[in-house]
Amino acid sequence: MAPVRKPSSVSQSISSSPFYFALYIILVLLGNLGNTTVIAVVGESLLRETGAVRSSDVILVNMAISNLLVSLVRNTVVMVSDLGVEVFLSRDMCHVMMGIWVWLRSANVWSTFFLSAFHFQTLRRVAPPVITLHGPRGPPSSLIVGFALVWSLNLIYAIPAFIFSKNGDENSTETLMLVSSTTRPLMGCIWDFPSPYSGLAFATSSMVIHESIPICLMNITNLGSLLTLYAHGHSRNTANKSQDAPVVTRIPAERRAAKVSDFDLNILFISSWGTNVISVNYFNYNRGSSTEFLLIVARFANMSFIAFSPIVLAVGHRKLRAFIKAVLLRMISLFA
């Protein structure tokens, strides 16, 4: 494998514009730094817990890990490629990398939905959670099983990417694009399905399983959370205080979590992935005059959720806010 300086047309369009290229680098670095901060701060607090850990924090760390892996393995490599360095892999390495890209992107989507579903399930629970001081340390077993299913099932889904891919050269062009894997050839790796129909079938199933269904489910859980909050708020004024005390004390903190970690992340997810879906499927099924522009839009939309989700989380997470505040105060004191 050797470096070749011949970027694609989409890469040339981004590299030729200082504004687009600077914005692209900022988004990649923001995603790397932001998700690393979430993992370090929230993960450190989990390790210091002496009893049962907060399930919501475990889910946040899982989502941040999936974001960081996608950003490092995919987006950072794209950024380096846009700097003018193209590395072409062997056929076997392309099998591995295409499978990893599909696996990580797919698991990333469902890890995000996991957080929304958890908040909905928590709000639906009438009684407060039972916490035992001398119980087993660590996250609930059901949470571990959920994580195992998300990562293992998406690995199974990514098996075709380990098989139906090949290495190309500097003149190769992509004839099929999937939101969950690629918006252009990277490291010379391209799809190699037996026929155009089988390729479109895989692309369509990807659109349904990893784009349409998660967006619909996140809308359902988000709407259910908001309706549950409304019902609890209404019951506070009408029901007997002694009967509703556990619910009332639990609502304020979960209201913030639902509004920030669920609603805002849902909006960010739908806007970024929705834009990506429209752009990439326009390429797959239309190939009109706006293809190149929409692929540039897809590239930025692809990274926007990973880059901005740590900022959204910081707004609603007390320990993240405290850490960022401490860092900013230290920076101000150094430059003062």
Image (tube, grey):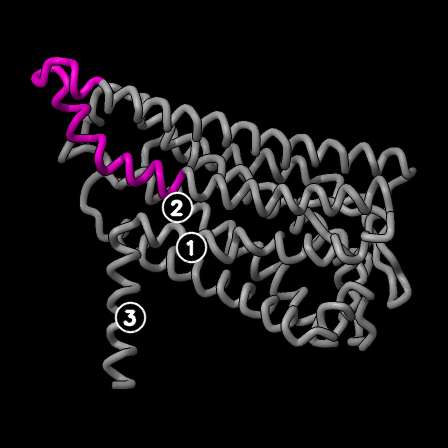
Residue 212 position (above or below residue 43): above
User: Of the residues shown, which amino acid type is indicated by label 3?
Assistant: Val
Looking at the image, residue 133 sits to the left or right of residue 230; the answer is left
Q: Secondary structure at mark 3?
A: helix
Q: Is residue 183 left or right of residue 77?
A: right
Which mark, residue 60?
2
Tags 1 and 3 in contact by the CB under 8 Å rule?
no
Instruction: Classify residue 142 as left or right of residue 107.
Output: left
Residue 158 % position (x, y)? 68, 40
Q: Amino acid at mark 1?
A: Pro
- Position of residue 321 measured from the top left corner of the image (x, y, whole percent): 28, 57
Which range of residues does the magenta coloring cover? Answer: 235-262
- On residue 310, the disc is 1
Where residue 257 appears, x then y in whole percent? 31, 40
Looking at the picture, tell me which residue is in the foreground, 262 or 139.
Answer: 262
Circle 1 SS class: helix
Q: Residue at x 19, y 33 (%)?
A: 135
For the C terminus, the image quarter is: bottom left
The residues tagged by marks 1 and 2 sit, at their Cα atoms, a distance apart of: 10 Å
Q: Label 3, on which residue?
A: 327
Depth check: give the residue in front, 240 or 84. 240
Mark 2 vs mark 3, foreground winner is 3
Measured in 3D between alpha carbons, the distance from the residue under mark 2 to the one under mark 3, in whole angstroms, is 21 Å
State the residue at coordinates (41%, 56%). Answer: 311
Q: Amino acid at mark 2?
A: Leu
